[in-house]
Amino acid sequence: MEKPKKAAAPRKAAATKEKAPAKQKAAPRKKEPPPSPVPRLLGVLESQKQLGGASYPPTLERLAELTGDTPAAASKALNTKEAKARVLLSRAAGGKKKPAPGTVLVLLKDDLEAVAQSDRLLELQLQSARKPDAPAVDLAQLPKGLLSALGRAFKAALEQRIAERRLPRTIGVVTGKKPLFFFLADAVLPDAGAPALPAASAAAAGIDAAQRPTAPAGARPTAPAGARPTAPAGARSAAPASPGSTDAAPTDAPSNGAPAPAVAAGAPAAFAARFDAAFTALDRASGGLNYVTLRALRAALPDVPRAVFDAELAALRRQRRYSLDPSDGRHYQMADAERDAGILEAGNLLVYVARRHDA
């Protein structure tokens, strides 16, 4: 008997699978670039120009401090195409040996000629070029490191200064085939009452008697370069940074711990001459940054009553010889003694003194 055949299994209809549309990948969101720091830097630079005096042109270090940037970040921003259209750095940032931010001035392009003729640039270049064992610097060496256009204008301005016998109060020059510039603080000078060098002796020594520098009335002769400055007993130096401060405090004392030099009192000495000598000594001791605290200057002239000191300083400010600046409080917490020594004007406590260069 035959076995019944199994029925063939029905063929499954081939299911037509529709391909699902491929998922489109979402385009990555582009990160918006941070706002350019250039407008902010330009704004602060313009405001410093309005202040004038020792405020303009600021060093790269000072501009960065005012804007809250690091000098490296400020330098990078100022070297962009956007900034270069309006701003110049006195020294090129490139090269193996980058200049210190405190030796680079930041200026508007339109002010190149004015800055080339300024006392500020001369003092900064001389400070950068001098050495402890060679404090006098040849004219040809002073423009080195400057932007080429600024360097040419600066050299021409130096030659004109010599011809017109016009120099800052802090600087002298030995004329001749190779003029030598030096800080008066590096020279050993006679007292103001010392007899002048006779013209015949001056000519024999190769010195221009009319150009011969003398110490300001009441100031003591400055020690030779390299000598360690000392102050009389009782003279105070600037206060150190407060314990909680993260940045080093601005100081008017030498970094080696020696006390800042004080100016000896003299009954016939004029306040202006003694103040000039005190400022020069304290500024040189703190690195030549043209910023000295009122506290240190009051300590250097301890015999001058506060009311007289303030009145005489106000007269020097009216003569455009000095300016006063407040502390912004962001990088340095002032000690009580520094606040007490300040002068309150229009709601601002002025604690720093700077020598003006546009007088």
Image (cartoon, rainbow, N blue to C red):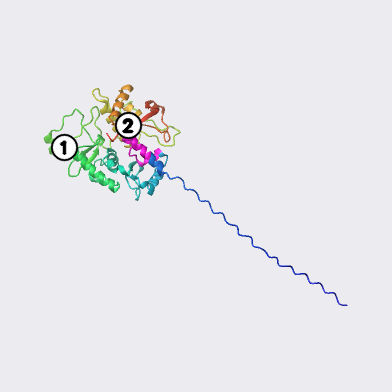
Q: Of 54 and 295, which appears nearest the observer?
A: 54
Quarter holding residue 297: top left
Mark closer to the observer (2, 1): 2
Count of numbered tags: 2
Sequence-wise, the earlier of marks 2 and 1 is: 1
List x then y, in percent, for residue 107: 33, 42
Which residue carries the number 2 mark? Answer: 323
For the N terminus, the quadrant is bottom right
Q: Secondary structure at mark 1?
A: loop
Q: Residues within 10 Å of mark 2 (few under 14, many from 20)?
A: many
Q: Residue at x 12, y 35 (%)?
A: 201
Quarter holding residue 211: top left
List x then y, in percent, for residue 146: 29, 46
Q: Secondary structure at mark 2?
A: strand
Q: Classify residue 2 as left or right of residue 63.
A: right
Which residue carries the number 1 mark? Answer: 208
Q: Classify residue 248 as left or right of residue 314.
A: right
Q: Given the current orientation, which residue lies at the most extreme right position?
A: 1
93 shown above or below 319: below
List x then y, in percent, for residue 134: 25, 42
| Measured Cα–Cα span from mark 2 to mark 1 | 33 Å
9 shown above or below 278: below
Q: Of 346 and 203, which appears nearest the observer?
A: 346
Q: Classify residue 241 as left or right of residue 214.
A: right
Residue 49 painted magenta:
yes
Extent of the magenta region: 44-66
